[in-house]
Image (cartoon, rainbow, N blue to C red):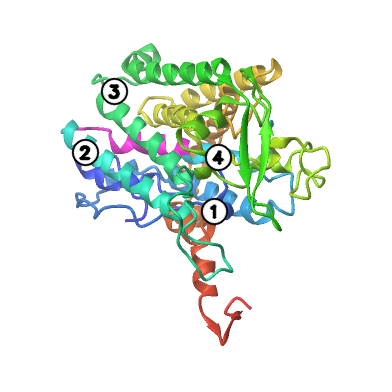
């Protein structure tokens, strides 16, 4: 089935929804744990293909997804050697920081195509909830710590320490909220452009605005008290660290509301144990790479922090809703894509200039707008190249990767294929096929 998404009735397209967003949606933390696969239910038979349906197929979406998959692999494998493309340790945006929002944007576009017509809203809702639950559960297995690493032939996870959030879990949350908005809140009028389009989708836009305001209220209005944590240190049992905060609205690594909410609701033992800010100048001698702690490193440098936490995933919904608007049918779509894309970029850089910095771990508003604007520009360019002018041959490899994105993510980004290869060895585990 591999990513098919024709503009057909929703009852036919519903079986393809998960493949539409197949792929890494992911901020690229796969080497630290992430991924998912084998989650789509048996496809609902689609009507026979026809020239009309072939023309309606949005090949550029596959190509865009394939490019994002390639970018994901590049930053995963080369990021350790090229810090400039690795994830930013905190404020700022690098090449790796575009991967997760690109996939979320693609999910939104695909959902607009899949739910073009919804004859049975209750059935569509049931299927969407079921798919989101499957995606979330697969993320728990692949990102929760069940697999112990490429060179470890052991597996299993203590449920008291399983990582609860992750890349696929974030996609599942954004997916179900966006799908429900498209199923229940889309206007019935078939309009193509202008203010009529805004009026038709006003409820979806209102939801996005409410989500954004709620996020900002929590981020800047939540009081963060002092806190402490314990970690295991080689040569000893446990070591305690005290983090002094007692602030409100702080966006630094140690005293932000995003981390506090995750610690209170999920529990610090269920968070990601290799925080990205450990590579910051305040913590690492070799910053922006990992390295020994600085002698004067702050106490929060080794504290668990989940880059796909609860509050930051709220803003991920906004990225998905933006992609949803790009997927709606309208005339002069290139201009309708370019104008909001440039507008979001201008607004994002303005917010960053005035102190609301782009920050992926927190998924700030400026970061969401900047990455969504970049996604819109890239998608418009690919659409013009592939769907308008028909240049599919140069992008054939990207199209194939896009239609098999979830498989590639699971096998490569989540290390399932390397783990499988290391499982075959001669006499001793070190004599495996990879050597």
Mark nearer the N terminus (4 vs 3): 3
- Badge nearest the viewer, 4 or 3: 4
Magenta stretch: give its range: 104-118
Mark 4, other Cα within 10 Å: few <14 / some 14–19 / many ≥20: many
Residue identified by numbered label 1: 394
Mark nearer the N terminus (1 vs 2): 2
Q: Would you say residue 7 sits in the magenta stretch?
A: no
Quadrant showing the C terminus: bottom right
Residue identified by numbered label 2: 126
- Where residue 46 appears, x then y in whole percent? 21, 50
The part of the image, by quadrant, that contains residue 259 is top right
Q: Is residue 46 above or below residue 90?
A: below
- Badge nearest the viewer, 3 or 1: 3
Residue identified by numbered label 4: 306
Mark nearer the N terminus (4 vs 2): 2
Nearer to us in this view, 384 or 28: 28
The part of the image, by quadrant, that contains residue 200 is top left
Q: Secondary structure at mark 2?
A: helix
- Badge nearest the viewer, 3 or 2: 2
């Amino acid at each position: 089935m591999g990513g098919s998404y024709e503009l057909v009735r929703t009852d036919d397209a519903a079986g393809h929804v998960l493949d539409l967003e197949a792929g890494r949606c992911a901020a690229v933390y796969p080497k630290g744990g992430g991924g998912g696969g084998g989650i789509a239910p048996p496809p609902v038979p689609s009507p026979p293909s026809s020239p009309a349906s072939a023309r309606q197929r949005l090949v550029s979406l596959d190509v865009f997804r394939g490019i994002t998959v390639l970018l994901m692999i590049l930053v995963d494998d080369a990021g350790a050697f090229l810090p400039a493309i690795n994830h930013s340790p905190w404020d700022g945006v690098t090449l790796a920081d575009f991967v997760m929002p690109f996939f979320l944007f693609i999910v939104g576009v695909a959902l607009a195509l899949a739910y073009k017509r919804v004859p049975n809203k209750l059935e569509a809702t049931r299927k969407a909830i079921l798919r989101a639950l499957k995606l979330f559960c697969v993320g728990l297995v692949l990102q929760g710590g069940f697999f112990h690493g490429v060179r470890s032939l052991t597996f299993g996870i203590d449920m008291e320490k399983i990582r609860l959030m992750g890349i696929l879990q974030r996609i599942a949350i954004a997916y179900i909220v966006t799908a429900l908005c498209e199923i229940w809140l889309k206007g019935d009028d078939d309009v193509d452009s202008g203010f009529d389009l805004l009026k038709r989708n006003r409820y979806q836009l209102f939801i996005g605005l409410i989500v954004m305001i709620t996020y900002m209220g929590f981020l800047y209005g939540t009081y963060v008290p002092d806190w402490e944590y314990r970690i295991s240190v080689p040569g000893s049992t446990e070591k305690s660290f005290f983090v002094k905060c007692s602030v409100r609205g702080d966006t630094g690594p140690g005293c932000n509301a995003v981390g506090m909410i995750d610690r209170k609701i999920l529990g610090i033992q269920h968070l990601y144990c290799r925080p990205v800010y450990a590579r910051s100048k305040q913590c690492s001698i070799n910053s922006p790479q990992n390295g020994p702690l600085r002698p004067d490193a702050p106490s929060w440098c080794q504290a668990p922090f989940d880059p796909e936490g609860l509050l930051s995933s709220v803003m991920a919904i906004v990225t998905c809703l933006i992609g949803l608007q790009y997927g709606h049918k309208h005339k002069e779509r290139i201009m309708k894509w370019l104008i909001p894309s440039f507008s979001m970029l201008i607004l994002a850089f303005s917010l960053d200039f005035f102190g609301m910095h782009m920050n992926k771990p927190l998924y700030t508003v400026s970061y969401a707008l900047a990455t969504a604007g970049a996604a819109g520009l890239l998608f418009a360019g690919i659409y013009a190249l592939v769907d308008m002018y028909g240049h599919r041959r140069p992008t054939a490899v990207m199209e194939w990767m896009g239609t098999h994105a979830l498989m590639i993510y699971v096998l490569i980004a989540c290390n399932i294929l390397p783990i499988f290869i290391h499982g075959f060895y001669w006499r001793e585990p070190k004599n495996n096929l990879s050597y």
